[in-house]
Image (cartoon, rainbow, N blue to C red):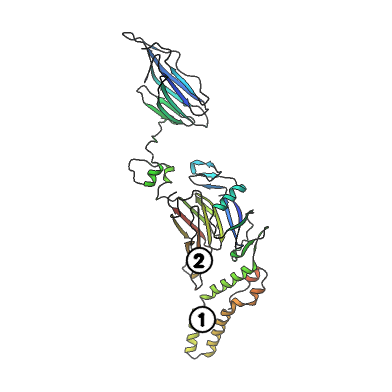
Amino acid sequence: MLILRGNTDKLQLVTGTAVDIEVHVSAMQADNTAPPVVQALPNFGPRASITTATTTDIVDATGLTSGHVYNVKSLTAYNNDATTSSVVTMQVTDGTDTTVLAKVSLLAGESLLLDESGRWFHLDANGGEEPSVGNAATQAEMEAGTATDKYVTPQGMNWHPGVNKAWLKAGTTGNLLNSWNITSLTDTGTGVLTITIATDFSSVNYCVNVSVEATGTTWAVANTRECHIRSATMAVGSVAVDCIDNTATTSLVKDPTSWHVSMLGDQ
Amino acid sequence: MRVVKVAVTLADRSVAILSFLTEGRGNVLPPGGWWINQAIGAWGRSATPEAIAAEVARTAFEQPVVSHRVIADDAAPQDRTFRNAWVDDGKSIVHDMDKAKQLKREHLRHDRAGLFPVLDAQWSRAFGQGKADEAAAVERRRQALRDIPADPRIETATTVADLHAIKLPE
């Protein structure tokens, strides 16, 4: 429920994007007699669709006599667009001051609802109430990793210091078999693979784990491989790894059966 | 995963084969990328000359980059025995035979290294037991292994197939 003062207040909807926003208002009018006369407003109900990015007067009480009020019992703003979202802002203005009552990003099929008790609800395309995103951990909170009153979103997972920022499995020739946040692999030479990642680390002080698949199930000398982070190759956006057969007096670079690399650190 | 292969020639004439991902997965888009399916982090991007040049520039090669060009997926030789002898002649990836010959010598030295302790033991036993003929035979094999990196067939080889034909002496 929302009271709008006669001769003063307007309830407005600000649409941030040109989509099809459909608004319905259910309201009553009361005068200042004793006892007050309360009556429904037959000219309210479904409003004309708002299809531009603009500010629209939803309920205009400025035409009422001072002392009379509009009592908005409920209100719905629905995004009827098939694909595009829009930020919508419900606000009240008296011509001098403007107060925002609710502001949400409505995805396609979502709606903003004011009920008779005065509560605002953000409903998803299935009519279910959206969870509060106000308690989702921010990037700073995820990187700190200490909050106990925040929840983790799939996006936020990527910011936690204990989570791999990038990983890959590649074949002998540096052929990528599966990956996360990798943009290219370079076969730099026998037993050398250079990896370039999607998002640079904030410094070269990040952690690289590298392993290789053995070339056989028996522990014959010929099956042994030793892998490393290649010396002095760590840059913020790429790193090289290498693999050798060091089982003879002269070590030799060798291609492994497959490479396995993961990286942790701050980005 | 879809890639475009790029041959990157470095200052020492070696060639690196960069696989530029045109489809990948992650929580962020690469520059110029778009979501194929954001719900699973699947993205795509075009292999434009600018995007490839930027990717080459972002990759920390151990040698300065001299040039790069897009190559066919199967342009690199299948045989990786002499991988470090690959060079890009501007039309295809070929073997620098001087480098390949040097690699062949390194491979032979590496492969023979494990044989010497065994032969040394055989020679000591034969010598200690007064079996001069047996000791001499072991010594001939040891000398053949010592000489193999200098096998003249290495120097006269004209293809990597010629190098593959050279084995450790029996």
Residue at the extreme left of the image, as rendered: A34
Residue that numbered label 2 is attached to = A244
* Image location of residue B48, percent across then percent down: 61, 47
Residue at the extreme front of the image, as rendered: A96
Instruction: Please determine whether, in this image, residue B26 is positioned above or below residue B127.
Output: above
* Quadrant that contains the N terminus of chain A: top left
* Image location of residue A52, percent across then percent down: 53, 25
Could you say which quadrant of the image residue B31 lies in?
top right
Q: Amino acid at mark 1?
A: Leu
**Helix, strand or loop status at disc 2:** strand
Q: Nearer the viewer, residue B149 or A97?
A: A97
Q: Is residue B101 visible?
A: yes
Q: CA distance from mark 1 to mark 2?
A: 25 Å
Q: Is residue A215 visible?
A: no
Mark 1 on the same chain as mark 2: no
Instruction: Please determine whether, in this image, residue B85 is positioned above or below residue B136.
Output: above
Residue that numbered label 1 is attached to = B119
Q: Amino acid at mark 2?
A: Ile
| Residue A136 horizontal side relative to residue B95, left or right | left
Q: Chain of mark 1?
A: B
